[in-house]
Amino acid sequence: MKSNYKKIGEHIRLVDKRNKGLKVKQLLGLSISKQFIPSVANIIGTDMENYKIIRRNQFACSTMQVRRDKKMPLALLHEVDEAIISQAYPVFEVKNEQELLPEYLMMWFTRSEFDREACFHAVGGVRGSLEWEDFENMQLPVPHITKQREIVKEYNIIQNRIALNQQLIHKLEETAQTIYREWFVNGIDLENLPEEWQVEKLDQFTKMKYGKMLDSELFLEKGYPVFSGYGVRGYYSEYMYEEPQILVLCRGVSGTGEVRLSPRFSYVTNLSIVVEVDNPAISKMYLYYFLRNSDLKSLDSGSAQSMITTSDLYFQDAILPPSELQMKFDKVANTVIKEIEIKNTENQKLTELKDLLLSKLATVEN
C-alpha cells in the first residue's frame, strides 16, 4: 500500500443531530446511483423529530444490502444547506477539510472499485450488509490538499459539461414536442377532423414485437447499449437495431405505457414493445410523438404486475394527417433528434473521460 493511503475512518466522524422541534422540513432519500432524491416514503403518523438532520458537505450512506445491490448507496449533500433523512442512514462528515476535501472523498466513493471492495467486505448472507468498522478501515490515497483541489476542479469541469448537455437535450426535446402540438394538436377538433385526415388502427400500418431478455451476467463494460426503455442497463457484444426504434414500455414497476426512442445500434430488452412503421406513407417521427401524446397507460392490465401487450396496442386508433404534412414534420423532428444524438454521444465520451479520471485516483501522487 502506498504511503499516502489512509484509512477512511481517520478522516471522518459520525454526526447524529435529530430534528427536534421539527425545524427542518425537506425530507430526502438516498438512491443507489449515489444521489439524494426527494423521499417517496409514507410518513403519515411518523415521528419526524427522530429523523436525522444532514447539512451541506455532510454525507449519508446505507450499509444495508450492499452485496445484493453490488453498490453502496452514498451521497454528499451540496444541493441545499440542510435537510432531514431517515434515521436508518449513518450521517458523517470530514473532520478536517484542510486535509481532505469532501468532494475528493465523494469522487473516491463514486469509483466502481470502491463498490467492489465494499461488496467484498459485506457480510450477513445474500443481501450482505457492511459493518461500519469495515467501512472505516477501507483506505484511499490522500494527496496534498492542493493536488486534491486540482483533481476536483478537473472532475467538476467534466461534470458541468455533462449537466449542460443534459439541459440542452431537454430543451431540444421540448422544442420537438412544441412543434408537434402546434402542428397536430392545438386547434384540432377530434370530432371533426380536417379534410384528408384519417383514423386507422395501429395494426393497419405497424408491426410490433417484444424486445429480448438478456441475462445481466452477459453485460460488458463497453459495447452496444442494452436499452430497456427505462434506460441503458449495460452493454453487449451484439445489437438488434441500427436505427432508433419506437418503444412502448410494457412491463415494470412504473412507467408502463410511456413511449421512448431507443439509441442507435442498441439491444432492446423485453420490458419494451418495438413499434415498427410498415408503411412508407407514415412518418416514424410523427407516430413517435403521436404515441407519446396518447394515453397508453390506460392499457395497463391492472394486475399485480403492470403489463401492456401487443394485442392491446394493435387495436388503438391513430390520427393520421396527410402524408405530406407528416413528412415535413419528419424532417424537422429528425433534425432535432440528430442534435440530441450528438449531445448524447458527447456525454458518453465525457463519461468515459470521467471514469478514466476516477480510475487514476488509485495511483495519484502528491
Image: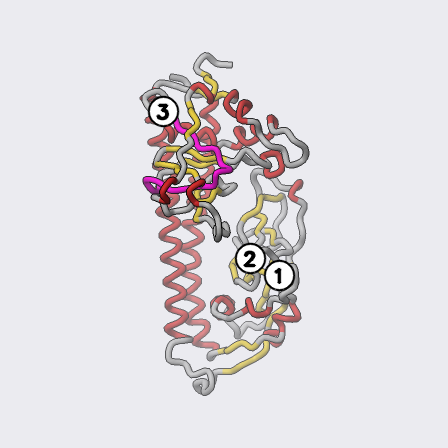
Q: Relative to 349, is 314 above or below?
A: below
Q: Residue at x 32, y 21 (%)?
A: 98
Mark 2 burial class by Cα count in 10 Å: few <14, some 14-19, many 20+:
few
Mark 3 or mark 2, whichever is nearer to me: 2
Gap between marks 3 and 1, in whole Å? 47 Å
Q: Which mark is residue 54?
A: none
Task: Judge left or right: residue 287 versus residue 27.
Answer: right
Q: Name the residue under label 2.
A: 254
* Amino acid at circle 1: Ser
Q: Residue furthest top?
A: 3
Q: Which of marks 3 and 2 is nearer the N terminus?
A: 3
User: In the depicted view, which residue is nearer to us: 251 or 355?
Assistant: 251
Q: Which of marks 3 and 1 is nearer the N terminus?
A: 3
User: In the image, residue 219 lies at what x, y percent?
Assistant: 62, 41
Which colour style is shown? secondary structure
Does 284 appear above or below 81?
below
- Which numbered circle lies on residue 306? 1
Secondary structure category for the residue under label 2: loop
Residue drawn 41% across the image and 81% down it: 188
Q: Quadrant of residue 250?
A: bottom right
- Residue 317, above or below 73: below
Give the Cα separation between the discs numbered 2 and 1: 8 Å
